[in-house]
Image (cartoon, rainbow, N blue to C red):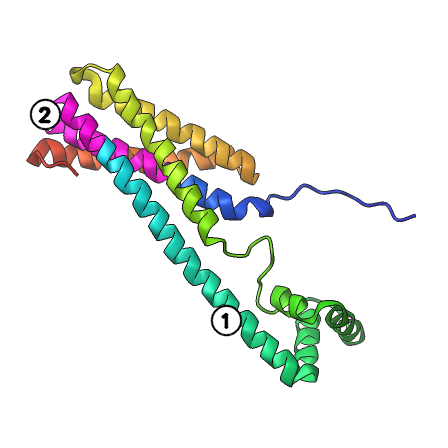
Amino acid sequence: MLKIHKEKHRTQHIGWLRAAVLGANDGIVSVASLIVGVAAAQTATNDIIIAGIAGLVAGAMSMAAGEYISVSSQADTEKADIEREKIELETDLESEKEELASIYKGRGLSSDLAEQVAEQLMEHDALGAHARDELGISEILAARPIQAALSSAATFAVGAAMPLISVLFFSPSFLILGVSFTSLVCLALLGIFAAKIGGSPIIKAVLRVTFWGAFAMLVTAGIGSLFGIAI
């Protein structure tokens, strides 16, 4: 009896994880930078909160629209490639079989075995075999515009809420340092979460997100301080 060996891979998380991490990271960094820049310009706390809320709403909508448009473009390209492959399979089946066999030969199979594999896979699901092995399109990695848009918008809002809420807990004299520290902690936690889900090194992920977050806040604080401009 054949024993099935179960393995835990992280590839199935790529679609939603990328959008979620991008949204949360952008929410934390952009709104924290906005708050720090406005605060550095000696702005009243109420005005800082209003600016933060505006940044949260505008950013979430922008993320949703941007993700939907970009991922829809990817989905359209995938659909066009699939349709083209359908026509080729209908009009020149033998050439498509040879093409699939050549792919397997390039991956190390002998000529005879590659041809047998190509023939059997095409008998089972010709379009699926070509989509997966020729075009690199699979169900796991297929573009999902609505999922990407909702994930990005929701996670942006959650991420942006962290520095915005922290404004309420710090006096004006400690606002910049307090919001910056809180935001960096949130970014570090986000890096840990992404690394855990994706199975990647934790320290590398944390250093990456905290470095760029700190850099963004430093730049906007400097601009706000020098010119009194809310970025």
* Image location (x, y in percent) of residue 69: 37, 57
Residue 71 to residue 147: above or below: below
Principal secondary structure, stretch drawn in magenta: helix
Residue lying at 34% horizontally and 46% vertically, measured from the top left: 63
Q: Which residues are magenta?
A: 24-52
> For the residue marked with disc 1, what is the amino acid?
Ala
Q: Secondary structure at mark 2?
A: loop
> How would you rate the neighbour count of disc 1 (Cα within 10 Å): few for under 14, some for 14-19, many for 20 or more?
few
From the viewer's perspective, is 32 left or right of 101? Answer: left
From the viewer's perspective, is 201 left or right of 133? Answer: left
* Image location (x, y in percent) of residue 30: 28, 37
Q: Is residue 139 visible?
A: yes
Residue lying at 55% horizontally and 37% vertically, measured from the top left: 197
* Image location (x, y in percent) of residue 19: 44, 45
Residue identifier under label 2: 42
Residue lying at 56% horizontally and 70% vertically, measured from the top left: 82
**Residue 48 highlighted magenta (yes or no):** yes
- Callout in the foreground (1, 2): 1
The label number, if any, that marks residue 34 in the structure image: none
Q: Secondary structure at mark 1?
A: helix
Sequence-wise, which precedes: disc 1 or disc 2? 2
From the viewer's perspective, is 191 left or right of 180? Answer: right
Residue 52 to residue 76: above or below: above
**Residue 50 highlighted magenta (yes or no):** yes
Q: Residue furthest left?
A: 227
How many dots with numbers?
2
> For the residue marked with disc 2, what is the amino acid?
Gln
> How would you rate the neighbour count of disc 2 (Cα within 10 Å): few for under 14, some for 14-19, many for 20 or more?
some
Quarter where residue 167 is shown: top left
The label number, if any, that marks residue 80 in the structure image: 1
Q: Nearer the viewer, residue 62 or 129?
A: 62
